[in-house]
Image (cartoon, rainbow, N blue to C red):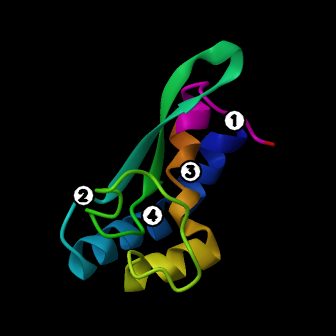
Amino acid sequence: MVALIALIVALPVALLTAIVIKLDSPGPIFYTQERVGKNGRTFKIIKFRSMRQDAEKDGAQWAAERDPRITRVGNFLRKTRIDEIPQFFNILLGEMSFV
């Protein structure tokens, strides 16, 4: 219930974020990554894309400070944690929970 309310409250910010991501750099609005949940069950986590589309072409790697793969908008999204808003969908689907 909390995730649904948070998603509704965050909807205006999420819509604005999606538009800004699309205008700032080419590529999809969302980033998905496979994660392992409870009892070894895998699921795809959803986030707003904060890096260039080809950021992991050489394989997954940790982001560094002033990482050139992070977009201008992505830097703001990461600092404010707005990139995490789509994870409310994962919570609604029962794949994640609040910690």
Dot label at residue 14: 4
Label 2: which residue?
28
Dot label at residue 7: 3
Find out whether the residues at labels 1 and 4 contact each other: C-beta distance under 8 Å: no
> 86 or 6: which is nearer to us?
86
User: What span is in magenta?
Assistant: 90-98
Say which element carries label 2: loop
| Count of marks overlaid on the render | 4
> 86 or 41: which is nearer to us?
41
Mark 2 to mark 4: distance in Å? 14 Å
Say which element carries label 4: helix
Q: Quadrant of residue 56?
A: bottom left
Q: Earlier in the sequence, mark 2 or mark 3?
A: 3
**Which of the two marks, 2 or 4, is nearer to us in this view?**
2
From this view, report whether residue 76 is shown above or below residue 92: below
Taking the spot 64% from the left edge, 47% from the top edge, the residue there is: 5
Q: Give the quarter of the figure containing the N terminus.
A: top right
Mark 3 to mark 1: distance in Å? 10 Å
Q: Earlier in the sequence, mark 2 or mark 1?
A: 1
Say which element carries label 1: loop
